[in-house]
Amino acid sequence: MTEQPEPTVQATSYEVSLLPEGDVNRLVFTLKVEYRGDGRWAVVRHRQCVNAAGEWSWESVPSEREDEWLAAHRFDLETALKLAKEHAPKVMVNGMTALSVYRRTHPAP
């Protein structure tokens, strides 16, 4: 009988949001940091990725991504999480930022 190898477990996605867990608005104001292979991560929202300069662009299908685009939109995990945290307050839905929604729904005591 051949021994079965141990399954691998790997985290491949993080949610980053200014709004706390349980907030009804959290889902639409959330960014994702997703693993893209080779130790590289992307900050994504609605099929767009952010680059180090803070610019968003559409993420094409893998076969159409050029090396230059990949270099600008892929990061180590620490950098990707930092970028996502920087952009989380700025996520905009229906003309409102995550920060304005947070302040509106979680007033200071």
Image (tube, rainbow, N blue to C red):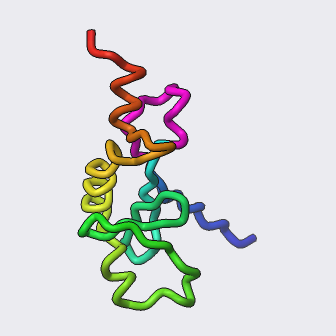
- Measuring from the top left, give residue 60's x and y in whole percent: 54, 79
Q: Is residue 78 above or below residue 94?
A: below
- Measuring from the top left, give residue 74's x and y in whole percent: 35, 73
Identity of the residue furthest to the front in this view:
95
Q: Is residue 38 above or below residue 65?
A: above
* Position of residue 57 in the picture relative to residue 64 (left or right): left
Identity of the residue furthest to the right in this view:
1
Instruction: From the viewer's side, name the closer residue of 108 and 38.
Output: 108
Q: Is residue 97 above or below residue 55?
A: above
- Measuring from the top left, give residue 75's x and y in whole percent: 31, 70
* Position of residue 81 in the picture relative to residue 57 (left or right): left
* Figure quadrant of the N terminus: bottom right
* Figure quadrant of the C terminus: top left
* Position of residue 39 in the picture relative to residue 44 (left or right): left
* Quadrant of residue 62 within the rendered picture: bottom right
Residue 27 falls inside the magenta stretch: yes
Region of the chain picked out in magenta, as a range: 16-28
* Quadrant of residue 35 within the rendered picture: bottom left
Q: Is residue 30 above or below residue 53?
A: above
At horizontal 31% and vertical 78% (from top left) the residue drawn is 72
- Measuring from the top left, give residue 56's x and y in whole percent: 39, 67
Q: Main secondary structure of the magenta part?
A: loop
* Quadrant of residue 43 within the rendered picture: bottom left
Instruction: From the viewer's side, name the closer residue of 7 and 62.
Output: 62
Instruction: From the viewer's side, name the closer residue of 66 and 75.
Output: 66
At horizontal 29% and vertical 48% (from top left) the residue drawn is 85
